[in-house]
Image (spheres, rainbow, N blue to C red):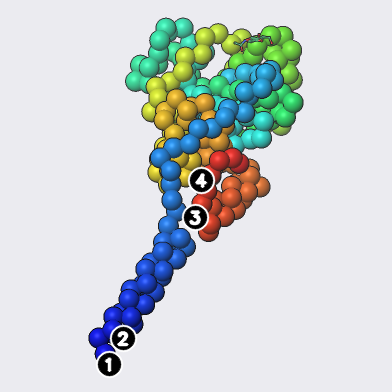
Amino acid sequence: MRLSETVVILSRFVCFVIVIILLADRAIGIRFPDRISEVPKDSSNQPLKTAVFALGSFWRSEAVFGCLDGIVRTTVGYAGGSKTNPEYRSLGDHAESVQIEYDPRLINFRQLLEVFWFSHDSRQVFGQGPDVGNQYRSIIFCNGTEESRLAAVSKEREQTNSKSSIVTTQIQQLGTFYPAEPEHQNFELKRNPFLLQLIGNLPEEELERSSMAAKLNGYAAELCPSKIQRQIDAKINEIIRKGWPILREL
Ligand SMILES: *[C@@H]1O[C@H](CO)[C@@H](O)[C@H](O)[C@H]1NC(C)=O
């Protein structure tokens, strides 16, 4: 074989290898941009409403509500006590709580109450499962008489269904809600680096404002309703298959 022929064959081979590498990279490589900016869903001036509940560990409470359609964002914090500026290690007489901002056109207070009752055991005294203590007590916080009425009606119904065990849930007018430290916000999502990367490694402030982060936080804890859990599964699988683009909305 002449030298020029060898060179041609060799260079074709090199091209072939490069094409294979590029194809393989496209097929298996998910390319993540450093970050994306999410336009908050409430950028139009639709009026949002706020609700606060305490139902055990706030990591879990946030995951339960964050998944639901109509929830714009969730924040964990401390409420229901008298101590000013509570902290995780010294929250005084407060309860671990979740603040929910929601679009009342998509979900209402009555539906939030149903999720509240369904998502914890209101008959356990001062705790949920292994989490025992005053900070895990069950509270519905109300803003105004209509919410108090709905809360009382729902508690009565719950008590009727609970027969002999006492429903421990307290109903209180909402006072100050103290947001918890950043490391407790979207706690379940933060334990999942893959999902964090999938939404572009948002900086903390954006993560806390993001509706998608609230949803994925519930997904990470596997606490979404099964239909939503499956929808998110499908969306993530599609992105992995395509390798592009990043997850921008759910
Ligand atoms: C209570 O409701 C009123 C009117 O709906 C609203 O303006 C106010 O911000 C609410 N307060 C809290 C703490 O959410």
In percent of width and height, residue 193 lies at 40, 43
Q: Which residue is mark 1?
A: 1
Please tell me whether mark 3 or mark 1 is closer to you in this view.
Answer: 1
Q: Is residue 155 visible?
A: no
- The secondary structure type at the circle numbered 2 is helix
Residue 243, disc: 3
Taking the view exactly as shown, the residue that stands out farthest to the left is 3
Other residues around mark 2 within 10 Å, as few (<14) / some (14–19) / many (≥20): few
Please tell me the numbered disc located at residue 246.
4
Q: Quadrant of ligand 1?
A: top right
Helix, strand or loop at label 3? It is loop
| Residue for point 72% across, 9% down | 145
Evaluate if marks 1 and 2 touch, with contact meaning CB atoms under 8 Å apart: yes
The type of residue carrying mark 4 is Ile
* Mark 2 residue type: Glu
Q: Which element carries disc 1, helix, strand or loop?
A: loop
Q: CA distance from mark 1 to mark 4?
A: 50 Å
In three-dimensional space, the C-alpha distance between marks 2 and 3, rounded to whole angstroms, equals 38 Å
Q: Which residue is mark 2?
A: 5
Q: Secondary structure at mark 4?
A: loop
Q: Are marks 4 and 3 in contact (CB under 8 Å)?
A: no
